[in-house]
Amino acid sequence: MLLLLIITGLIKTLKNLAGWNISDSMYLWSAQLHNLGMFLIILGIIGHLMAFVFKANRPLLRAMFSGKVDSHYIVERHSLWQEGVEMARDKVAENNIDSKTTACHIEPLGEVSKV
């Protein structure tokens, strides 16, 4: 979609440059495709934002800006993710690896109770 916008935007720009002669039909089609691409991108953004209508997804809004997800949300919605994080944390502790020097820094989840 982004490539479509770039190409059609360049075609629309070329019409305004001296020495470039673009037919009216080419310009019309590039303008229409450009408008369609923008419409679809705007619909996609609105669709993604509509996810926050559901109360269960609202903690993710804060996570988008902070980069941190609440541990209760992980337990409720992503139990496999929780298990993977716990396994990685255990492996780091088991091998006496300083997590601050590893490529994958794992923040503690805090106390998480199984539901």
Image (tube, helix red, strand yellow):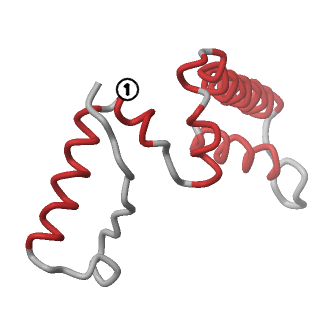
Residue sitting at 39 percent across and 62 percent down? 107
Q: Position of residue 76 (x, y in %)?
A: 37, 26
Q: Please count the marks in the image.
A: 1
Q: Is residue 78 left or right of residue 30?
A: left
Residue sitting at 85 percent across and 47 percent down? 15
Mark 1, residues whose alpha carbon is within 10 Å: few (<14), some, or many (≥20)? few
Disc 1: which residue: 76
Q: Which of the image's four quarters has the N terminus?
A: top right
Residue sitting at 33 percent across and 32 percent down? 78
Q: Position of residue 6 (x, y in %)?
A: 66, 47
Q: Position of residue 80 (x, y in %)?
A: 22, 35
Q: Looking at this rendering, what residue extends furthest in the top direction?
A: 54
Compared with residue 44, is residue 7 higher up or lower down, i.e. above or below?
below
Q: Is residue 88 left or right of residue 99?
A: left
Residue sitting at 38 percent across and 52 percent down? 109
Q: Position of residue 77 (x, y in %)?
A: 37, 26
Q: Nearer the viewer, residue 88 or 19?
A: 88
Location of residue 96 (image quadrant): bottom left
Question: The residue under label 1 is which amino acid type?
Answer: Glu
Q: Which of the image's four quarters has the C terminus?
A: top left
Location of residue 30 (image quadrant): top right
Q: Nearer the viewer, residue 21 or 57?
A: 57
Q: Nearer the viewer, residue 2 or 60?
A: 60
Q: Looking at this rendering, what residue extends furthest in the left direction?
A: 95
Q: Is residue 54 left or right of residue 22?
A: left
Q: Nearer the viewer, residue 114 or 103?
A: 114
Compared with residue 28, is residue 92 higher up or lower down, i.e. above or below?
below
The secondary element bearing badge 1 is classed as: helix
